[in-house]
Amino acid sequence: MWKRDAAVKPANSEPGTPATPSQPVAMQPRQQGVRDAAVPIGKSVVIKGELSGGEDLTVEGSVEGTIELRENVLTIGPNAKIKAQVFAKAVTVLGKVNGNITASEKVDIRDGGSVEGDVASPRVVIADGAHFRGSVDMKKKGAQPVQQSSAPAQPKPPQLSGSVEKQLQGSPMAAAPAH
C-alpha cells in the first residue's frame, strides 16, 4: 500500500518527543496542492456587497457589488451572474458580467462569456463566440488608472481650420445641421 517516510520515527522511539502522526506519503503533496487551487463559490451562492480576498477564486453563483482580488486570479464560471465592479490580477469570463472589469495583467472573455461594461487591462482577449459591449482600455502594466467622472463623456465637435471654414461658407454642407 504505502511506505512510511524514512524521516518519520515511531511515536515511542524516544520518550519526551512529540508523536508524529503517521500519514501516507502520497497524501502530503495533495494537501499542498489544495492550498494552491482556486476557491470555489457554488451555483446556489448569492453574495451582495463587497467580496475580497487573498486567494484565487472561481465564482459559479451570483455576486452583486464589488469584487476585489487585486493580487489574485478570478474565474467567472459558465453559470455565474455578476453585477459588480471587478478588480483582479487576471480575470477569465465564462459566464455573465454586468459591470466594469479592471485587471493588472489580463482579461480573457471566452466563448459563451458575456461582458457588458468597460474593460481596463494591458492584455485583453475576446474569443470568437463571446459577447462584449463596452469599451476597452489597454493601459500599460503598472500605469495609473484614469479617474473617470460620473458624467458620461460628450464627443467634441471637430475643429475646422480657418481656410476650410471659408471654403465651406456658401456650400450646401455649411447649411447642414451638425450632428
Image (cartoon, grey):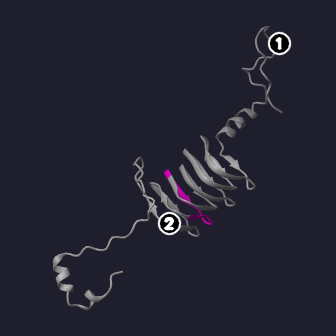
The picture places residue 21, in percent across and down from the top left corner, at: 79, 23
Q: Helix, strand or loop at disc 1? A: loop
**Is residue 26 visible to us here?**
no
Quick check: 5 above or below 82?
A: above
Q: Which of the two labelled residues, at mark 2 and mark 1, occupies the earlier sequence position?
A: 1
Label 2 CA crowd tier, 10 Å (few <14, some 14–19, many 20+): few
Which span of residues is magenta-colored? 103-115
Question: Split into 4 quadrants, where in the image is the C terminus?
Answer: bottom left
Of 69 and 13, the residue lying toward us: 69
Residue hosting label 2? 134
Q: Quadrant of residue 113?
A: bottom right
In the displayed structure image, the side of residue 154 where residue 36 appears, left or right: right
Numbered badge on residue 12:
1
Q: Looking at this rendering, what residue extends furthest in the front direction?
A: 151
Q: Residue at x 50, y 61 (%)?
A: 118
Q: Amino acid at mark 1?
A: Asn
Q: Residue at x 33, y 82 (%)?
A: 178
Of 13 and 16, the residue lying toward us: 16
Q: Quadrant of residue 3?
A: top right
Q: Residue at x 63, y 58 (%)?
A: 82
Q: Residue at x 41, y 53 (%)?
A: 147
**Is residue 110 visible to us here?**
yes
The picture places residue 49, in percent across and down from the top left corner, at: 63, 50
Question: Split into 4 quadrants, where in the image is the N terminus?
Answer: top right
Report the number of numbered marks.
2
Q: Quadrant of residue 78?
A: bottom right
Q: CA distance from mark 2 to mark 1?
A: 67 Å
